[in-house]
């Protein structure tokens, strides 16, 4: 064992606790990706409305803005393992509610849409707390010098599960229907919760539920500390501007992909290709996530590589405006996945090991919230714009991809952003 103060840190990467978290996430991700594809296809087939799709994703993203920072503070103050287990159980119950709605109210699309909104928002909320706890607990389960490798290994299995779910989700949806998929999704969450319940961790929770008023007040104090930590760092502020803008302009591609696939002016393919294209991106992300484990951790070369990845992501997404072949769209989205995975793991690993353990949850969640806070607006605008302009998706894709690349060029001109990406310290 390695020691950090009075705490013991695992000396091996593939230890029992890390593997329990790993397998739980993998199984639940497979079920979740099946359910996500099923929901998307049901909305497209039933409503054919990009506005409806964008509105659903927009509303589901709003809780992240409100609860994101608090979720990180909660992960610092209370047991991260318990948060993970409880979130999986709640998600499993929500999937079961969705299955029952599809069984008993199949002839009432209006009611099912209402249930979809409630379930989707509920799962978004549980995912906020789950993600903050997982990001915060991972460095406690592996040696510090193996965090990037742990992130890569975790992402490999999760993305493989996501890839399989996306790839076969549309097929299973057509064969078995929505209820069967959501029942399976519910079972995967319950399995995940059972696996994660056996984890032991070095974390010593800082609070309890004895005096809830004091606990709530402390949570808000912790959240303010997270904001202060992020906002006083110039490099992090520039990261927020750049990654926030990239996130805003990438959202239209995910909202509008089902319409892009089936529209005769673009890919003119069956909706099964939505799953295949997203599966290709998941595969690319898996490959990209593994690369930081074998690349140098610091230096000009790796820093410029990360900025090049961001620039060419914009080029790749924009190129979809001129694509009419399914195989070419699949290749482009797989490439975008590689660039996304490489960049994401590099940045997150850097943050995880540089932020103090006792503040890791609140700082990472605040940073993530500030980057993602534009997502709901982007999702809503994408759906409305697509319907308003008669699904002229090529114009929307070309504009969004071009702005992404321009944002990266701006970031490269900012000294503090370059210093942060390249790993320099003031």
Image: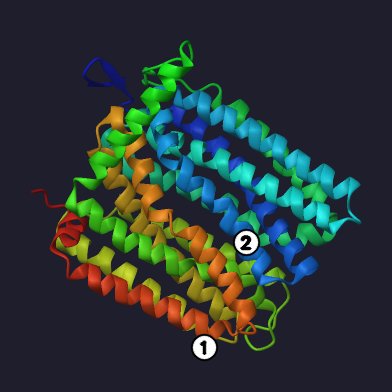
Closer to the camera, 249 or 419? 249
Q: Is residue 369 above or below residue 94?
A: below
Residues at discs 1 and 2 in contact (Cβ within 8 Å): no
Instruction: Name the residue that disc number 2 marks.
Output: 55
Give the residue drawn at x 71%, y 35%.
93
Report the front residue among 135 and 385. 385
Hey, which quadrant is residue 163 in on the image? bottom right
User: Which label's residue is closer to the chain start, 1 or 2?
Assistant: 2
- Number of callouts: 2
Q: Position of residue 404 (x, y in %)?
A: 37, 73
Binning the other alpha carbons within 10 Å of mark 1 as few (below 14), some (14 to 19) or many (20 upward) gives few
Query: Compared to 197, does 410 lie above or below?
Result: below
Secondary-structure class at tag 2? helix
307 on left or right of 368: left
Observer able to see residue 8: yes
User: Against 108, is 226 above or below?
Assistant: above
- x%, y% of residue 7? 28, 18
Q: Is residue 14 left or right of residue 308?
A: right
**Which residue occupies 49% across, 69% down?**
334
Along the horizontal axis of the image, is 69 left or right of 226?
right
Q: CA distance from mark 1 to mark 2?
A: 27 Å
At 43% across and 54% down in the image, what residue appears?
373
* Nearest the eye: 121 or 260: 121
Give coordinates of residue 189: x percent, y percent. Answer: 65, 36
The label nearer to you, 1 versus 2, is 2
Residue of label 1: 322
Question: Looking at the figure, which quarter contains the N terminus?
Answer: top left
Q: What is the x, y in percent for residue 250?
A: 46, 68
């Amino acid at each position: 064992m390695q020691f950090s103060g009075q705490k013991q840190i695992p000396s091996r990467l593939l230890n029992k606790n890390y593997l329990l978290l790993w397998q739980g996430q993998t199984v639940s991700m497979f079920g979740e990706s099946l359910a996500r594809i099923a929901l998307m296809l049901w909305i497209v087939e039933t409503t054919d409305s990009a506005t409806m799709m964008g509105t659903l994703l927009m509303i589901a993203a709003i809780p992240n803005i409100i609860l994101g920072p608090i979720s990180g503070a909660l992960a610092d103050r209370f047991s991260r393992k318990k948060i993970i287990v409880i979130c999986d159980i709640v998600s499993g119950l929500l999937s079961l509610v969705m299955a029952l709605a599809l069984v008993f109210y199949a002839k009432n699309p209006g009611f099912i849409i209402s249930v979809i909104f409630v379930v989707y928002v509920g799962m978004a909320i549980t995912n906020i707390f789950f993600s903050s706890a997982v990001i915060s607990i991972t460095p406690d389960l592996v040696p510090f010098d193996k965090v990037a490798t742990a992130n890569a290994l975790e992402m490999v299995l999760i993305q493989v599960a996501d890839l399989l779910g996306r790839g076969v989700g549309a097929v299973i949806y057509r064969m078995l229907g929505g209820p069967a998929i959501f029942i399976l999704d519910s079972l995967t969450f319950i399995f995940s919760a059972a696996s994660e319940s056996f984890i032991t961790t070095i974390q010593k929770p800082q609070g309890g539920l004895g005096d809830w008023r004091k606990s709530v007040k402390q949570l808000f104090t912790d959240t303010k500390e997270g904001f202060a930590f992020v906002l006083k760092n110039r490099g992090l502020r520039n990261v927020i501007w750049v990654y926030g803008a990239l996130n805003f302009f990438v959202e239209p591609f995910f909202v509008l992909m089902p319409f892009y696939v089936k529209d005769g002016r673009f890919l003119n393919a069956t909706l099964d290709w939505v799953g295949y294209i997203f599966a290709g991106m998941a595969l690319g992300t898996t490959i990209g996530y593994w690369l930081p484990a074998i690349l140098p951790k610091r230096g000009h070369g790796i820093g410029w590589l990360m900025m090049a990845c961001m620039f060419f992501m914009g080029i790749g997404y924009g190129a979809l405006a001129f694509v009419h072949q399914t195989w070419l769209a699949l290749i482009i989205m797989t490439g975008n996945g590689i660039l996304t995975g490489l960049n994401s793991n590099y940045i997150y690993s850097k943050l995880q090991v540089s932020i103090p353990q006792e503040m890791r949850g609140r700082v990472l969640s605040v940073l993530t919230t500030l980057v993602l806070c534009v997502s709901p607006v982007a999702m809503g605008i994408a759906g409305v714009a697509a319907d308003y302009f008669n699904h002229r998706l090529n114009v929307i894709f070309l504009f969004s991809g071009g702005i992404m690349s321009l944002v990266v060029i701006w970031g490269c001109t900012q000294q503090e952003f370059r210093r942060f990406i390249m790993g320099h310290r003031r």
